[in-house]
């Protein structure tokens, strides 16, 4: 039986939606039976049929027959056949014989008579269907007449099943039929209770009900356990039609709160299918319990109007505001999910219930406008929210005490004396209120612990907010600034990346003079191997050795000057002893020359020095230090960007394979070397590369992926065909096609200017109403200036506005303000407006 | 050396011998010495003339009761020397840290003797060139086309010695007592000479004319021993804590207000002194009557025939006879020594005691003549601190800078910064600058934008009254727009009749900052330098004409404007919107991403990261930024690609714009509902 019901449920749904559209021949409806014998013999057990017996011609029953014929179709849906049995003239059996019986219709289940209906109760299709089903569903639908009956049933059902209570003004009506039809489907799931007593309607309906209209309540008795409490009720807010009841019951049957752990765009629940919105309560692990309760509360409020789902943000990566706590998905196709920041459950409910709003949203034209408005509003609300990553990060970190024991605090008093204490003093000039300074201070404290115990080195700091005189005396105009003071020498200002590693390395390298004068051939060789001087042996830098003959003074001086500039960044030595010629000859160059020892002296490259200007030499050294096929990292990218060439960059999930490395190196070294920067990026080491790929292609492509990025001209990004293997040949021919314009870029770098992320407070506009003399017209007409009207009763108004935002103003202050026009007009409107913002931040105690 | 120098500048013009100097300063009071300090620092040829044998002769006599009402705050909890000057109203500006007033006195309200000692030290320690015992008794002009200003100033001292200067700085102060003449004013004692020994007033009834600090100071001194004191002046009492003007009645002197309001016999009256008359009876008692009665009587008749007001109005307020009447009406500028050709005119209305000057402190009548010090207060009378040491030490410096530019081609000092330092440079100044703070509404910091707004010049403490002449006065260019940073009290907050303690007087939220009442920084943005005409047509009571945009940094209880969200963030948004650029800071990683995904980079990345000075940031910081949703963490990205892709452009920026505050649980609301 239950399986059958289930089938009915689905068939009903199907029928409900397509019944009207499927053409059916009338013949299906009314069966004609030649004789009672024939009819009774054909009755199947358990199958219901409505039969009426008619003499061959019976003019009086004609209108009734028409109705019954048209109801046949409806009853057919419930497996009830409607049969017109022709009574032969001679038949005087129970149904045909009596004149009486001919005015009735008989309902059989199998061959058992269930009910006989007088034809006047079957006045139309609705009444026929309603009455027939009412009779058939005698057990499923309880008819009651008193409130006590209702309470009895309710109490009986508590903890067992739910109840559907319906009031219909009269039986045989369309509403009655709808209830019965619903009961036919849901009767085994829920207990249906029907009444026609207006008193019962009044007892169950919240406000003065209209007794002429039907009313349906869903009573959640299954979960109710407290015998003293009535079951929770959810009224059907719409007219009683089968479709509405069906929807209502379907909704009541859906879980109160759906837990969701996937992209809300993909979520579909019965609510959405039934054309109702779905409200997501965005939850976090920390607040799950509270959010769950909230969701349930909201769900009860919205039961029948919208669905509620609990979306766990921890499981789903949402690309939305972190403070959004509610999302609204409407059933309309293609409507984006709205993410909202609501403060009150009432807002959620209004959001759904405000039908006008929903309607507006559905209207396309207005929708756009409103969205814009909403966005504007949202933006305004976000103005006072920090969107500077550095400032925010620093302020989130401010409670942590920094390990600064290794860093000496310098003041105006001890600054100069402290500089004398160590051979080298590193000074960080910063301002304690400034975010970038504080970010650097954090790295600096790490440097201090790295370099702890390094002889002759003192790390210190000066807070320029405390000692502005000292900072200006030291010519520090920007924060942060790091200087290295050496005894008797000019201080060196650090100009590298503000990172722990870079700064540590700079400080360490700065300990050795730059360039370092090498005295013997042995020292020079040891220097190239990275063994000399011992302070730097632990550091694996490319070593640069300038070799000069005694006659090349000019080049040597330029080299020394370049050394000063590059001090701390480059390991530079110079050799100008008599046997310099021998040294240079070993590397097949003649002085003045540069020897470049990469990776611990395993390969030494000789370069002739032809340019003697300091600037050129610095430029050249910097250039020579660049790798041929570098791995691009966050710290080293700027060096390669300065070449202002397009990048041929291989994104790799980890280290690149030997093969790729070899091919790429060949490419880099090849003739095209000057035209582009060949490099690669290790996504493991530089995970932000994922962000780049995601920007170029909306998904991460299969790796490794080789790209041509025109960073400086046009910004096109081309992707090397993934089906081809990365070989020098393939890449070169691809590059040729690319240059010839035969390839289509996969992406183009955004050309957008960096505009202000959010608008500022427009104080000028805010001031205008209260300061009329400010308006651009030099002669403001008092009548023209839109002075806000409420200003005329300033006392009361200000008080009203302020009660919400601030401390309650005393009577005196209110009265005072009335007495002194001039001040009182100030900003009443903005203060009133401020009420909305209340709770965002409390500055006043 | 000094003698040689003077001898060298001796010159003979038409028979008379003149000692020539580029700059002559009249008066070695605080302003004169302050001017001398700057001239000396700049290596200028100057001399200071002081009629007394020592500096600060006014302070040797005044205030009579020797208590200065300029605060000398020992402790502020801060070591910032610039900031501390905000609460040190007595020190002059110098590089010498010994010359801070707190080293001279521990009193919050120090003695005037200390000031004299301080000024002596200031002159001697800094080796300022002051000629003592030289009283300039006449100043005239000598036309000369070669001269800086088209004329020389010829000064004559009491010994008929002549001096010649190209520029004349008058720091002679205000030392001529204000006197009112009415019948019987001969019975009035002056503040200058009145006894300061309270015992001399024992059991006496005293009338004090005037209602300034000197009047109240005098009353305060004798309050305990007199029968009662009455105080008469034309205008109502102005309390400095209501007017926010330090020249009005300070709380330290207001004992008489207490005894008046508590009906302890003392009293305050309003009346025009010009209408008064005083007659002395036979017992030597002084009676108040009206000039009107005197005019109608027979001159020859005796004293008894004079009508007293109480004869007609028997409850006339000042019907009780007085033992003494004391005049405490302040001082005025000594106009007498200037030749008519200098057109040294008194101001109009309530500034008639001051000479007329322009907002650049230059005399309206004579080019090249600047008024310094308390006599220059007409510029900001009853508004700011220009009449007091803690104000005019800055305006004197401003005048010096104007002169350096005008005569020596030294442009107004300015520091050039990259645009990324814009917010910082403003925050630094509004938090520590003392000149802006003391000379609120008068001196302003000016930011001159360079082309394309990639850099800017920062000029400190320029007199905004001459903003329109900025290019000419400073030698700097203002072609690309400018910011003007000043400090302001709320409009309509200050005034003698204002309640400054009303509820909600303080604004706390940045979005209502424009309604701030207490002193707070205000930034005006102009796309073009305002013209003279615009300056003239500015709204009344406005220091500046309507700007293209304005920003108020919300007033702060601690006057500490470094809060990241309430102070710095709104300021940054304002600056960003004026310049139409993004002034946020970014970690190197973000710049790296932008470098690969944008053709243009935000200024912070351009001026930092691209120049290999990116902000790497510590692990913790980057973690915090990720937590805040302002930085994306890619370390845990998987390659399965089932994550929703960032489909639309700018999603990264969007992310960075967004910000996390923890999702607010709605639970408390639920609970409330259930009840």
Image (spheres, rainbow, N blue to C red):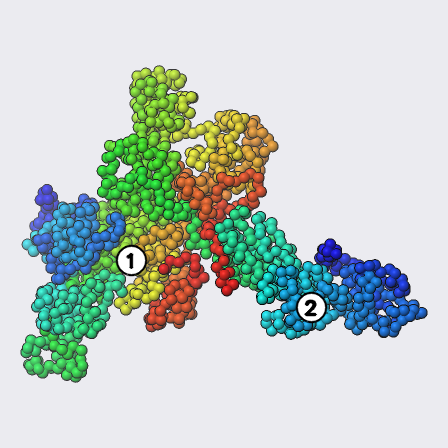
Q: Which chain carries label 2?
A: A
Residue B441 badge: 1
Q: Is residue B69 above or below residue B474?
A: below
Q: How far apart are marks 2 and 1 (CA)?
A: 82 Å
Q: Name the residue under label 2.
A: A194
Write down the quadrant of residue A111 in the picture.
bottom right
Q: In this view, does A478 lie above or below A798?
A: above
Question: Would residue B363 be seen by someone viewing this image from the given angle?
Answer: no
Instruction: State the image coordinates of residue B201 (x, y, percent, origin top left).
Output: 10, 69
Instruction: State the image coordinates of residue B143 (x, y, percent, origin top left).
Output: 16, 53
Camera-near label (2 vs 1) is: 2
Helix or strand or loop: what does disc 2 sit on? strand
Question: Would residue B400 be seen by someone viewing this image from the given angle?
Answer: yes
- How crowded pointer 2 is (Cα within 10 Å; few <14, some 14-19, many 20+) is rated as many
Q: Do labels 2 and 1 share a chain?
A: no
Please tell me which residue is depicted at 42% across the width and 21% down the height of the picture. A602
């Amino acid at each position: 039986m239950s399986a059958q019901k289930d089938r009915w449920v689905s068939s009903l749904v199907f029928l409900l939606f397509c019944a009207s559209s499927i053409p059916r021949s009338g013949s299906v409806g009314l069966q004609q039976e030649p004789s009672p014998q024939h009819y009774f013999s054909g009755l199947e057990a358990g199958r219901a049929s409505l039969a009426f017996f008619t003499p061959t011609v019976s003019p009086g029953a004609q209108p009734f027959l028409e109705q019954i014929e048209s109801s046949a179709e409806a009853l057919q849906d419930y497996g009830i056949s409607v049969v017109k049995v022709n009574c032969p003239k001679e038949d005087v059996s129970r149904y045909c014989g009596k004149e009486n019986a001919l005015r009735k219709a008989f309902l059989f289940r199998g061959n058992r008579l269930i009910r006989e209906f007088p034809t006047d109760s079957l006045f139309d299709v609705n009444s026929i269907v309603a009455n027939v089903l009412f009779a058939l569903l005698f057990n499923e639908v309880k008819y009651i007449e008193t409130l006590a009956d209702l309470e009895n049933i309710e109490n009986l059902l508590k903890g067992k099943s739910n109840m559907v209570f319906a009031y219909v003004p009269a039986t045989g009506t369309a509403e009655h039929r709808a209830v019965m039809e619903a009961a036919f489907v849901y009767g085994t799931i829920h207990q249906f209770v029907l009444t026609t007593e207006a008193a019962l309607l009044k007892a169950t309906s919240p406000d003065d009900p209209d007794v002429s209209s039907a009313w349906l309540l869903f009573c959640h008795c299954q979960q109710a356990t407290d015998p003293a409490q009535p079951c929770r009720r959810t009224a059907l807010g719409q007219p009683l039609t089968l479709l509405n009841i069906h929807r209502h019951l379907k909704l009541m049957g859906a879980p109160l709160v759906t837990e969701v752990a996937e992209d809300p765009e993909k979520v579909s629940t019965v609510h959405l299918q039934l054309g109702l919105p779905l409200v997501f309560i965005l939850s976090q692990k920390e607040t799950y319990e509270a959010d769950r309760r909230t969701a349930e509360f909201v769900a009860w409020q919205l039961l029948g109007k919208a669905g509620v789902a609990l979306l766990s943000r921890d499981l789903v990566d949402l690309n939305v505001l972190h403070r959004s706590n509610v999302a609204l998905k409407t059933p309309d196709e293609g409507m984006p999910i709205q993410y909202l920041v609501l403060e009150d459950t009432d807002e959620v409910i209004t959001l759904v219930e405000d039908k006008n709003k929903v309607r507006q949203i559905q209207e396309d034209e207005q929708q756009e406008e409103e969205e814009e408005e909403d966005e504007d509003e949202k933006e305004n609300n976000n103005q006072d929210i920090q969107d500077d990553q550095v400032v925010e990060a620093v302020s989130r970190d401010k409670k942590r005490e920094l390990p600064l024991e290794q860093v000496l605090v310098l003041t105006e008093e001890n600054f100069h004396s402290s500089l004398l204490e160590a051979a080298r003093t590193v000074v960080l000039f910063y301002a304690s209120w400034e975010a970038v300074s504080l970010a650097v201070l954090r790295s600096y404290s790490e440097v201090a612990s790295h370099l702890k115990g390094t002889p002759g080195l003192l790390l210190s700091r000066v807070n320029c907010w405390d000692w502005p005189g000292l900072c200006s005396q030291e010519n520090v105009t920007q924060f942060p600034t790091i200087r290295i003071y050496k005894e008797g020498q000019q201080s060196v200002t650090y100009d590298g990346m503000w990172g722990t590693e870079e700064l540590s390395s700079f400080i360490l390298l700065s300990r050795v003079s730059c360039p370092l004068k090498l005295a013997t051939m042995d020292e020079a060789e040891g220097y190239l191997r990275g063994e000399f001087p011992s302070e730097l042996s632990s550091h694996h830098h490319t070593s640069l050795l300038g070799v000069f003959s005694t006659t090349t003074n000019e080049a040597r001086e330029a080299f020394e000057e370049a050394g000063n500039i590059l001090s701390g960044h480059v390991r530079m030595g110079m050799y100008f002893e008599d046997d310099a010629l021998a040294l240079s000859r070993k590397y097949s160059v003649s002085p003045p020359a540069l020897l470049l020892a990469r990776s611990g002296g395993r390969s030494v490259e000789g370069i002739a020095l032809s340019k003697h200007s300091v600037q050129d030499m610095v430029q050249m050294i910097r250039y020579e230090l660049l790798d041929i096929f570098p791995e691009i990292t966050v710290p080293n990218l700027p060096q390669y960007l300065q070449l202002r060439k397009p990048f041929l960059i291989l994104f790799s999930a980890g280290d690149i394979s030997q093969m790729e490395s070899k091919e790429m190196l060949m490419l880099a070294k090849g003739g095209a070397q000057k035209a582009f920067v060949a490099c690669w990026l290790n996504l493991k080491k530089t995970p932000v590369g994922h962000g780049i790929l995601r920007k170029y292609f909306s998904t991460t492509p299969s790796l490794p992926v080789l790209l041509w990025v025109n960073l400086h001209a046009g910004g096109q990004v081309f992707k090397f065909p993934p089906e081809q293997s990365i070989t020098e040949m393939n890449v070169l021919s691809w590059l040729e096609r690319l240059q010839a314009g035969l390839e289509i870029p996969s992406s183009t770098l955004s050309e957008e200017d960096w505009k202000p992320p959010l608008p500022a407070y427009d104080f000028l506009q805010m001031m205008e109403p209260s300061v009329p003399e400010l308006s651009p017209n030099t002669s403001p007409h008092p009548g023209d200036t839109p002075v806000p009207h409420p200003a005329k009763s300033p006392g009361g108004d200000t008080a009203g506005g302020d009660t919400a935002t601030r401390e309650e103003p005393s009577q005196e202050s209110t009265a005072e303000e009335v007495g002194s026009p001039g001040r009182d007009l100030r900003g009443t409107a903005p203060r009133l407006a401020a009420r909305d913002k209340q709770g965002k931040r409390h500055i006043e105690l | 050396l000094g003698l040689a120098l003077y001898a060298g500048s001796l010159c003979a013009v038409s028979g008379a011998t003149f000692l020539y100097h580029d700059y002559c300063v009249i008066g070695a009071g605080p302003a004169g010495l302050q001017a001398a300090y700057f001239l000396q620092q700049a290596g200028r040829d100057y001399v200071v003339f002081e009629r007394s044998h020592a500096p600060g002769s006014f302070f040797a006599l005044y205030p009579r009761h020797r208590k200065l009402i300029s605060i000398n705050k020992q402790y502020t909890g801060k070591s910032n020397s610039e900031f501390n000057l905000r609460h040190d109203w007595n020190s002059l500006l110098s590089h010498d840290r010994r010359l801070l007033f707190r080293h001279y006195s521990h009193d919050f309200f120090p003695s005037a003797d200390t000031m004299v000692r301080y000024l002596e030290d200031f002159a001697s320690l800094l080796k300022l060139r002051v000629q003592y015992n030289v009283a300039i008794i006449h100043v005239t002009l000598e036309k000369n086309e070669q001269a800086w200003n088209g004329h020389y100033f010829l000064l004559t001292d009491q010994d008929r010695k002549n001096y010649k200067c190209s520029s004349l700085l008058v720091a002679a102060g205000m030392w001529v007592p204000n006197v009112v003449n009415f019948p019987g004013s001969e019975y009035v004692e002056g503040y200058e000479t009145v006894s300061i020994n309270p015992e001399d007033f024992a059991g006496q009834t005293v009338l004090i004319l005037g209602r300034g600090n000197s009047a109240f100071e005098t009353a305060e001194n004798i309050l305990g021993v007199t029968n009662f004191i009455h105080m008469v002046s034309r205008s109502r009492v102005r309390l400095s804590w209501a007017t926010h003007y330090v020249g009005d009645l300070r709380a330290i002197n207001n004992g008489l207000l207490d005894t008046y309001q508590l009906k302890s016999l003392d009293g305050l009256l309003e009346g025009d002194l010009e209408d008064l008359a005083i007659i002395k009876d036979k017992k030597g008692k002084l009676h108040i009557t009206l000039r009107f009665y005197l005019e109608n009587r027979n001159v020859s008749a005796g004293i008894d025939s004079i009508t007293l007001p109480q004869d007609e109005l028997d409850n006339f307020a000042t019907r009780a006879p007085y033992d003494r009447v004391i005049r405490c009406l302040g001082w005025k500028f000594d106009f007498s020594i200037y030749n008519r050709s200098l057109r040294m005119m008194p101001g109009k209305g309530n500034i008639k005691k001051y000479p007329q000057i322009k907002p650049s402190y230059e005399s309206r009548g004579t080019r090249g003549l600047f008024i310094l010090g308390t006599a220059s207060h007409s510029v900001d009378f009853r508004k700011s601190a220009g009449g007091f040491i803690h104000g005019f030490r800055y305006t004197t410096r401003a005048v010096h800078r104007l002169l350096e530019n005008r005569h020596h081609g030294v442009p107004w000092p300015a520091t050039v910064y990259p645009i990324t330092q814009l917010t910082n440079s403003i925050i630094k100044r509004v938090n520590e600058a003392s000149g802006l703070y003391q000379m609120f509404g008068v001196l302003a910091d000016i930011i001159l934008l360079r082309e394309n707004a990639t850099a800017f010049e920062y000029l400190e403490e320029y007199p905004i009254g001459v903003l329109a002449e900025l290019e000419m006065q400073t030698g700097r260019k203002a072609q690309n727009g400018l910011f003007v940073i000043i400090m302001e009290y709320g409009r309509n907050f200050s005034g003698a009749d204002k309640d400054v303690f009303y509820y909600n007087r303080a604004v706390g939220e940045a979005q209502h900052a424009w309604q701030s009442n207490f002193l707070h920084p205000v930034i005006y943005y102009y796309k073009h330098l305002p013209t003279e005409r615009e300056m003239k047509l500015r709204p009344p009571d406005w220091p500046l004409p309507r700007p293209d945009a304005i920003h108020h940094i919300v007033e702060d209880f601690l006057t500490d404007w470094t809060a990241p969200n309430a102070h710095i963030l709104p300021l940054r948004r304002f600056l960003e919107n004026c310049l139409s650029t993004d002034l946020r800071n970014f970690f190197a990683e973000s710049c790296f991403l932008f470098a690969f995904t944008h053709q243009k980079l935000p200024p912070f990345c351009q001026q930092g990261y691209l120049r290999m000075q990116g902000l790497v940031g510590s692990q913790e910081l980057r973690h915090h930024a990720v937590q805040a949703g302002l930085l994306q963490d890619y370390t845990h990205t998987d390659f399965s690609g089932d994550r929703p892709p960032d489909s639309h452009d700018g999603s990264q920026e969007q992310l960075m714009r967004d910000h996390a505050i923890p999702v607010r649980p709605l639970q408390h609301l639920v609970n409330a509902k259930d009840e």
